[in-house]
Amino acid sequence: MDDNLKGDIQMKRTWKSISFLFVVMLLMALMAACSNSSGGSSKVSVGIVLPTKDEPRWVQDEQRFKDALSDSEYTTEILFSQGSSAKEKENVETLLNKGIEVLIITPHDGAAAASAVEAAKKEGVTVISYDRLITNTDAVDYYVTFDSVAVGAAQGQYLIDNAQGKDVPLYLYAGAASDNNAFLFFEGAWSVLQPKIADGTFKIANSVEAEKLKDKVELTRDEMSKILGQVTTNWDANDAKNKAQTHLTAAGADLKGDVAVLAPNDGTARSIADVFGSDGDITSYLVTGQDAEKASIQYVIDGKQSMTVFKDVRTLVKDAMGIAVEILDGKTPDTTGSYDNGNKEVKAKQTDVIVVDEENVKKELIDSEYYEASEFTGL
Ligand code: BGC
C-alpha cells in the first residue's frame, strides 16, 4: 500500500473516533439536561402525600398546593394514599426514589405511618407532618396544623350558644380513631359541653360510654377511645349516615324534638343532617361541621347545616412550603410551639380557625375571595 493511502485511512479512523466521542458527549449532556427538568423520572425536591381524593377537603389541599407552587423554583410531586397505609408507604418509597429532600405528609393512620417516615428519615429526608400528626416515632421533624382543640371547642360552643331550654338531646359523633385529630376535636368539644351536660342543658342521646363519663371534666385518651368506639364516623359519610339512622331508630320520644348534634366535619355533617332532616319526630336540629367544603357552604346557606369551621388551607400550605424551602436553602425554619407525638416534642406551626354560619358566610368565604359567589345559590 502506498504511504498516501495509509495516511488517508488513518485520518478517516481519527475522524470516526472524534465523531463517536462527540456523539457520546452529546448524549451525556442530553441525559443530564433531562434529569434536571421537571418531567418524567426526574429529581423531585419536595414530595407531598395526601390521605385520599375521596374527600373534598384533601382535593382542596391539592389545589391550594398547586396554586402556591405554580412559580416555585423547586420541583414537587403530590400523591394520594386512598385511605390505605400500604399505598401511603408505597407513595413515600416512590418519592424517595425520585430523590426528595423534604416529605410533607398527612397520614391516613397516624400510628401506622411511622414506618413510612422512618424509611424517609433513613435517607436523610426532612419530614413535615401536615394537618395530622404522625405518632409514636421520632422520625417527624415538623408539624404544621390548625388549632384542632379550638375547632372542637368552637363546635361545642356553637351548640351551647344556639340551643334553647333544658334537657336538649345531644347526639355525639367523632372522627376516625386512627387520626390523632379526632381526639383533639373531641377533647375541645368535651371541654365546653361537659359543664353544660352536668348542669342539665344537654342530655346525651347516643353514647352509654359518654353518659358514664359525664361528670369528668377532663378525659384521658383511653376514656375518649371508649366514647369514640361508640360514636366514630371513621371520617366516612356512609358510616355517619348509618350510625345516625341506627341512633334515631333506637331513640324514644324524649330524645327527639329540638336536638343538637356534634358532627366532626362537613362530609359527615351533611349526611347526618340529611338523616335528622328526614325524621318526622325531629322538630329542629343544630349540627356542626368543619372544613368549609363547598357543598357544606351551600348547606349553611340553605339552613341545612348550622355552622362550619373554616380552616384556611392556603395558610397551611404556605407554612408547610415555607418550612420545606428553608430546609432546601439550608436554613432553620421558625416554629411557634410543639406537639407531643408520644415519642418526642415535634416543633409545630399552628394556625387559627374561623367559625362560619349563615350570618358571616358571605364575609368570610366570598368577600375574602376563598370561593366565588357564582359557586353558590341563594347567597
Ligand atoms: C382533618 C379534617 C378532615 C378530617 C377527615 C382531619 O384530620 O383535620 O379537616 O375533615 O381529617 O379527612
Image (cartoon, rainbow, N blue to C red):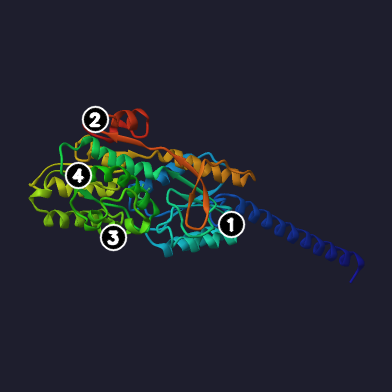
Sequence order check: which comes first, mark 2 or mark 3? 3
Residue at screen point 25% across, 29% down:
359
362 vs 149, nearest the viewer: 149
**Amino acid residing under circle 1:** Gly
For mark 3, what is the residue? 229
Q: Position of residue 248 (x, y in %)?
A: 14, 53
Q: Secondary structure at mark 1?
A: loop
Residue at screen point 16% across, 36% down:
164
Sequence order check: which comes first, mark 3 or mark 1? 1
Closer mark to the observer between disc 1 and disc 4: 4
Q: Position of residue 18 (x, y in %)?
A: 78, 59
Sequence order check: which comes first, mark 4 or mark 2? 4
For mark 2, what is the residue? 379
Q: Position of residue 264 (x, y in %)?
A: 29, 48
| Spatial separation of the CA atoms under disc 3 and disc 1 | 40 Å
**Amino acid residing under circle 4:** Phe
| Spatial separation of the CA atoms under disc 3 and disc 4 | 21 Å
Q: Is mark 2 within 8 Å of ligand 1?
A: no
* Left or right position of 66 against 377: right
* Left or right position of 363 against 271: right
| Spatial separation of the CA atoms under disc 1 and disc 2 | 47 Å
Sequence order check: which comes first, mark 1 or mark 2? 1
| Spatial separation of the CA atoms under disc 4 and disc 2 | 32 Å
Residue at screen point 21% across, 57% down:
208
**Amino acid residing under circle 3:** Gly
175 vs 211, nearest the viewer: 211
Sequence order check: which comes first, mark 3 or mark 4? 4
For mark 4, what is the residue? 202
Which of the labelled discs sits on residue 99, or is there none?
1
